Amino acid sequence: MRVLLISQYFPPETGGPPNRLLSIANGLREAGHEVHVLAEKPNHPEGVIREGFREGVFNERTYDGIPVTYTWVYTDPEKNFLKRLAFYLSFMVMAVVGALRTKGDFDVVLASSPPLFVGLSGWLAARLKDAKFVFDVRDLWPDLAVAMNELDGTLKIWLAKRLEHFIYHRADAITAVTNGFCEAIQSVTGLDTPVQRVMNGTEPHIFQRDEAGKELRDENGFDDRFVVTYAGNIGICQSLDHILVAADRLEGGRPEVLFRFVGSGPVKEELQQEAERRILDNIEFHPRVSLDEAAAHMAAADALLVPLAAHEIYRSFIPSKLFDSMAAGRPVLLSVDGEARSILEDAEAGRYYPAEDGQELANSIRWMLNHPEACTEMGENGRAYARTHCTREAQAKRMTAFLEELVDQAASG
């Protein structure tokens, strides 16, 4: 089976989307299939194409043994609606051109979104390459963009929904990362289009960094502190300002609690300014680090935060950070109701608190301070659950089996 994988984000860019697609590509290769990837020239999050990728329109490289065509995209460090649109549309066009440049036909074109425009690239590439078109949905767009106030105006929303429905109806099959997403998609496509859940996952060996965590605690001198860490994108949809409320509530009565933010994002500066305004001495901000370093920061924590904003749409989300946090072997403080909460409670790996509720977060941390043995057990439970149910390897095998079945049915039909 020859698979053309189209994703705007792919290593050496870092984060959940690139790592997910790398694991899928590796899973397909390990099953004996041929994979070629089309991705943008790495520029995230700086908005500047990295050194070594700036020559030419296309760069043909190999990453981890996988042939990759990196395409030029419009980038700009300053982002607004029009610049983001140009960014997405430029990749949509260049991905189709890149597909034309690849040799031979393919059995499957797997296009992973967001952005939604990647779906158009995948559909056109599949027609050009005489392939089945499979659309991989990691976020529900445009619904998420509307919830985050990134997309407004009746006409814009209507056009985006029309595009979403157009792509869904032209896909031969669809994969999505949660059951909630699958149900929403199936309500549009009907039962004739196969829709399969292929979750995000984790790589447990990356996050088993207990010794590195101890060293980091020693270096920073907070062995006597109860460290609560958020590691990741400091963005709008996480709604992290309630953590400052919790820090404010705990600073006087429980001075041993230390909150640490590790990462970067559009609201980081605003959070830092608010922490300074509140004169909070129990909060630290650290820059974005490599995945390996982030795993050490997570291992150095006593509890890990996995928050999202208080919006109904997030009930259908499972943050990939949940799997990584469980794999780190630390109890999780989760503020995402729905499927994510069910996983946490099934694993007995932490405590849920209502989204954006700083007081309840503070209460949950007080409970953890009073129940250290239970916290240790939660961490162990989470690590065991992640190893058994949430590995990227297992999800890659699930994707591979789904694509194999689709191609076999087409061949026999």
Image (cartoon, rainbow, N blue to C red):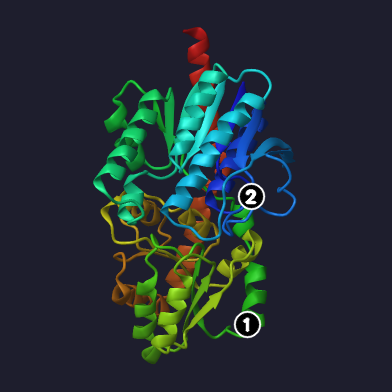
Image position of 381 with respect to 28: above or below: below
Look at mark 1 in the image and give the residue it sits on: 220
The answer to whether one can see residue 366 in this image is no
C-beta proximity under 8 Å, tags 1 and 2: no
> At which x and y percent is residue 86?
49, 46
Q: Residues within 10 Å of mark 2 (few under 14, many from 20)?
A: many
Front residue of this view, candidates 274 and 108 = 274
Image position of 2 with respect to 210: above or below: above
Say which element carries label 1.
Answer: helix
Residue at 50% x, 8% y is: 412
Count every numbered label the image shows and give the total: 2
> At which x and y percent is residue 85?
45, 46
Image position of 91 with respect to 101: above or below: below
* Position of residue 212 in the picture relative to residue 411 (left or right): right
Q: Which mark is residue 42?
A: 2
* Position of residue 363 in the picture relative to residue 388 (left or right): left
Residue at the outermost left position: 154
Image position of 410 with respect to 150: above or below: above
Front residue of this view, candidates 289 and 221 = 289
Q: Amino acid at mark 2?
A: Pro
Front residue of this view, candidates 276 and 382 = 276
Q: Quick one: label 1 or label 2, which is nearer the N terminus?
A: 2
Front residue of this view, candidates 250 and 94 = 94
